[in-house]
Image (cartoon, grey):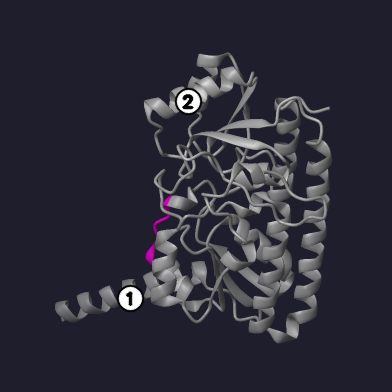
Amino acid sequence: MIVMFRTTAIAAVAALTLGGCAASTASPDDGRLHVVAAFYPLAYAVEQVGGDRVTVASLTKPGGEPHDLELLPRQILDLQQADVTVYLAHFQPAVDAAVAAHAEQSAFDVTEAADLMTLEQDHADHGASEDGDHADADHGDADHGDADHGHDHGGTDPHFWLDPIRYGDVATAIAAQLTAADPAGATAYQAGAQAFTKRQADLDEAYRSGLSGCRSTRVVTGHAAFGYLTTRYGLEEEAVSGLSPDQEPTAASMAHVVDFVRDNDIRTVYAETLASPALTETLARETGARVSVLDPVEGITDESAGPDYFAVMQANLTNLRAGQECS
C-alpha cells in the first residue's frame, strides 16, 4: 500500500511538472500559429508581421546574452510543439543543435534573407549606395573582427538587424514562411511585412540624414556588433573586443585601440547595455574620451532606452549624432 501510494504521488508530481511546462510554453488551441524565435530581433519581427494570427515565444530571455544561450527542457518542448521556428544558423550553437534534433520540419533559417557580411570583406566598401543596395564591408580589421574572437559564427557577422534594410528583407522572408504554414493568413502577413519594412525605410532615412555631416566617421565600440550599422551609413567601426562581448582583448589590441582613439581625435567611445562597460571605461580613462551608449538591440530590458527595437534605434541615432558631432 505504501509502495502504491508513493508511485501514485510520483506520477502525479510528474504529471503536474509536465503540465506546468506545457502550460508555460505551448500556445492556446485557438487557431493561431505558434512561433518560436531564437532571440529578440527575430521574435519582434515575427510579432510585427504576424500580428494577432501568431503567438511568439523567444528562446532568449530579456537581458540574456544570445551568444551564450543554453536551452532548458521546457524550451526544447516548445521547439517540438512549434508550428514555425525562426532562427539564425551559426549564431547560437545550442539553438542549432536543438533545431537539428527536434525542429527540422518547422525551422526557418533567416541567413539567406539577411545577406550576412563576411568578416573578411574590405574596409574600402564601407557605406551603402544611394539606391539602397546592400554594401559590403569588413566588420573590423583583422585583429578585431575575425571569428577567433569569441564564438565561431561561420565567418560571418550575425548582427544584421542593425541595418534597417536587411532587417526589412528578413521580415519579408518571415512573412513568406508564415504564409506557407498558414495560407489563410497570406494577406495579413503581407500587410504586416509591408508596414514593418516601411518603418524600416523611414528609420533608414533618419539615419542617412542624421549621420550625413559628422565631424568624425570613426566609431569606437566595446564590442564588434555594429558593422552593419556603420557600413550602411558610411562610418567605420573600431572595436575593443570581437563579436563576443565577453571576449577579453589582448594587451596589444587594447594598445592599438588606445592609439587609434588618440591618433584620430576620437572624443566619444561607446559602451553597451548588456555588456560590462569596464573595457570602454578603461579606454576613456586612457584617452580622455567620454563614454556614451550604443545598444546592439539583442534584447530589451529595463536598462534599454525604449520599449522596443525602433525606440532603441532612435536612441542610438541620438547618441551617435552627439558622439560623432553631426550637424
Which residue is pictured at 67% across the width and 64% down the height?
Answer: 170
Relative to residue 101, is residue 258 drawn left or right? Answer: right
Q: Quadrant of the C terminus?
A: top right
- Picture coordinates of residue 68, whole percent (x, y): 42, 51
Q: Which residue is mark 1?
A: 12
Tell whether position 72 is magenta: yes
Q: Name the residue located 75 percent from the left edge and 57 percent from the top edge.
A: 133
Identify the residue position indicated by label 2 in the image: 256
Residue 158 appears in view: yes
What segment carries the magenta color? Answer: 68-74
Q: Where's residue 147, x and y in %?
A: 43, 49
**Can you tell which of label 2 and label 1 is closer to the viewer?**
2
Residue closest to the eye, 119 or 57: 119
Q: Rounded to the nearest whole Å, what is the CA distance between mark 2 and mark 1?
A: 62 Å
Image quarter of residue 32: bottom right
Q: Is residue 231 above or below residue 69?
A: above
Split into 4 quadrants, where in the image is the N terminus? bottom left
Q: Amino acid at mark 2?
A: His
Image position, residue 310 (x, y; %): 73, 48
